[in-house]
Amino acid sequence: MGLTNSSSLAVCQEQDIEIWALPPCNKYLCPLLPICILIPMTAVCLLLLVLGVGGNVLTVIVTSCSQELHNTTSLYLGSLAVSDLLMLLLGLPLDLHRLWRSQPWVLGTVLCQVWHWSTEACAYCSILHLTALTAERYLAICFPLRAKVLVTQQRVKALLVVLWVVALLSAAPYLFLVGVQQAGNLSSDDDFSRECGPTLHAQQTGLLETMLWITTSYFILPFFCLYILHGLIARELLRVGKAHLGLASYRNHQQTVRMLGK
């Protein structure tokens, strides 16, 4: 790894490129990062894209086709895989495009808005899926009899639809808060400076800040829920483990008494 980094730096220095300086923009490229950082970052992103798409597609196929996996947990995992797959396919390629060509944005206003909306919605959806799945595991471990009655495949399917709708609607404001506009204070006649980002109206009215708080809450609140649920699950597993250990010790004691009695 050290040899690779040294080679990369040497190449950049040989080409008289300032390591931490952004290269000048032209009509083909306008990178957000120095080339020496952008190339390895692109390689990592492409690797994640290939592995992520392959893994999630395989998960969807296995959970939908295998008869042995037709249970509520598989429904969660299959839907979660779809969410992650959409995030990879809709978000990562455009992220890479923007890294290499931040200006001008040539893909249109609609794609700019859909890009931000879809990535946020899929992120929300994945978080909600993980929280709901953990809540189901909590019921199954701590209240197994009640879980058999409450947690059915039909109810889980309905819950998954609700989670998707909530996630899509929660991210819907991004359709109106982002767009294609001029960067900085440049003239509107300068097409080269057009970029995809928050609109001036969203920044001036505080709507963008409100959505950032909503996005933050989508990460913080589920984190606390997951922390509490996993703590309760761990406590229940420890309690059951101690109970089984005590029962095993009691049975061993009874067996020893019988052997001594004989």
Image: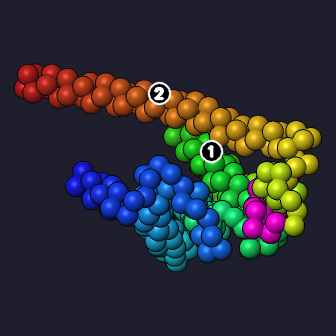
Q: Amino acid at mark 2?
A: Arg
Can residue 33 be seen from the camera position used here? Answer: no
Q: Is 220 positioned to the left or the right of 12 in the image? A: right
Tag 1's secondary structure?
Answer: helix
Residue 148: image location, x then y, percent: 61, 50
- Is residue 254 on the magenta stretch? no
Q: Quick one: quadrant of the C terminus?
A: top left
Q: Quick one: quadrant of the N terminus?
A: bottom left
Q: Quadrant of residue 117?
A: bottom right
Residue under the image location 40 percent in, 28 percent down: 238
Q: Amino acid at mark 1?
A: Thr
Residue interval drawn in magenta? 190-198
The residue closer to the viewer here, 69 or 122, is 122
Residue 31: image location, x then y, percent: 58, 62
Q: Quadrant of residue 155?
A: bottom right
- Is residue 195 on the magenta stretch? yes
Q: Is 59 positioned to the left or the right of 7 in the image? A: right
Mark 1 neighbour class, 10 Å CA radius: few under 14, some 14 to 19, many 20 or more = some
Which label's residue is closer to the chain start, 1 or 2? Answer: 1
Residue under the image location 47 percent in, 64 percent down: 42
Image position of 209 with respect to 78: above or below: above
Q: Quadrant of residue 209?
A: top right
* Residue picked out by circle 2: 235
Residue 101: image location, x then y, percent: 62, 67
Mark 2 neighbour class, 10 Å CA radius: few under 14, some 14 to 19, many 20 or more = few
* Residue picked out by circle 1: 131
Residue under the image location 68 percent in, 35 percent down: 221
